[in-house]
Structures are given as C-alpha cells and as structure tokens.
Amino acid sequence: MMEQRIEQHFIDSADLKYQSAQVLSKPIAQAIQAILACVTSGGKVLACGNGGSAADAQHFSAEFVGRFERERPELGAIALTTDTSIITAVANDYDFTSIFSRQVRALGQSGDVLLAITTSGNSANVLAAVEAAHQRDMVVVALTGRGGGKMNQALRDTDVHVCVPHDRTARVQEVHLLTIHCLCDGVDAQLMGDQEAP
C-alpha cells in the first residue's frame, strides 16, 4: 500500500514535469535572459519566498554564488530569507508583510532582478517585495502555481512569470526546483557555451 502511494508521487511529479515542459520553456528562457542581462552588467539577484519557497530562494543563491555544475566566476545573488535579525526585527517593529520589501528597498538597485517565489501567488510579503522591486526599477522573475493568484496583477510587462499549471503545493515546488536548475544551467550555458556538464 505505502509503496503504491510513493510510486504515485513519482508518477504525478514526472507527469507534471513532462506536461509543463512546453508551457514553461518560453518563460524560463525569458527569465534566463533577464537574469543574464542583470549579472553581466554587474547586478545581482535578490531571492525570496516562505517555507519551502524560502529554501528554494536559498538554493538558487547558493548555486549562483558558489556554482551549479561547472566552474565559473561567482555570480551575485542574495537570499532575503536568511538574516534572522533583519527578519525578526522588521516583523516585530513593523509587520511580517515587510520582511522582504524593506530588504529590497535597502539592497536593490536598478538593473537587479527579484526572484519572487510563491506557490499560490498570494503571499503578502512576496507581493510587497515585488512592489518594492518596481520602486527600485528592478525586473521581477516570479515563480508561482495555482493560476498565479494576485501575482498576475502585480507584475509588469517587463517582468517574467513562470506559473506552474498545478494546484498542489508539493508538485508546484518540485517544478520550481527544476526551474531553478534550468535558470542556473541556462545562465551558465550563455556565459560559457552550451556544452554538456562534465
């Protein structure tokens, strides 16, 4: 019984990834170009999200500052989810909705990119970060699911929306992780050529 349940998770995840490949390849390619333009002109990516999406923000930043699959120079990325003193101070002194937006206004500059991750598209603090990014003349790359939620109205024409066509949080997050790997691989391929990783 349990083995069948586990197998079904694998099948459902694989099916969604297969179905999403054509739908998401164009926005992911657009996101790669936006991030590439940012880092090649000396900019950085600020990444944020809550819970599993916070982990995804940190995963992305680790791959950028460290490396993905090939050796390359460091790329600028900061996960806004990691400084507990800032997060708790802002949440305590203002409100939880401001924990990312204040960091975006403090650290973001024109030409930077905000990687905004929310499976529902409705996370208030991520939406506030998007608004702050627009105030700083930053491009937003949003990773969502469930139809995109309020993120659909928050984004500008110059932003990129990667919306996973599924309602289940676990499945959306699994595709978000694959998307993050595609972003890292795509940037590396543009910077160093598209040969296979060793």
Image (cartoon, helix red, strand yellow):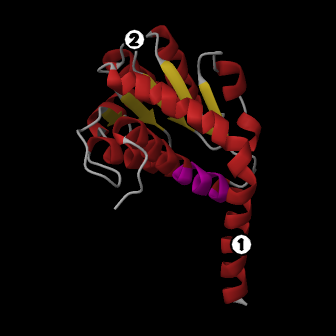
| Residue shown at 65% from the left, 15% from the top | 157
Q: Residues within 10 Å of mark 1 (few under 14, many from 20)?
A: few
Please state if 60 lies on the left or on the right of 24 as rendered. Answer: left
| Residue shown at 51% from the left, 47% from the top | 182
Q: Is residue 13 above or below residue 38?
A: below
The quarter of the image holding the N terminus is bottom right
Q: Is residue 152 above or below residue 192?
A: above
The quarter of the image holding the C terminus is bottom left
Secondary structure found at label 2: loop
| Residue topped by disc 1 | 11
Q: Nearer the viewer, residue 44 or 172?
A: 44
Overall secondary structure of the magenta section: helix
Task: Report which quarter residue 119 is drawn in.
Answer: top right
Residue 187 is covered by the magenta coloring: no
| Residue shown at 66% from the left, 58% from the top | 171
Please state if 136 lies on the left or on the right of 140 as rendered. Answer: left
Which stretch is magenta? 170-178
User: Reading the chain from its start, which is encountered first: label 1 or label 2?
Assistant: 1
| Residue topped by disc 2 | 110
Residue 106 picture location, percent across and down: 32, 17
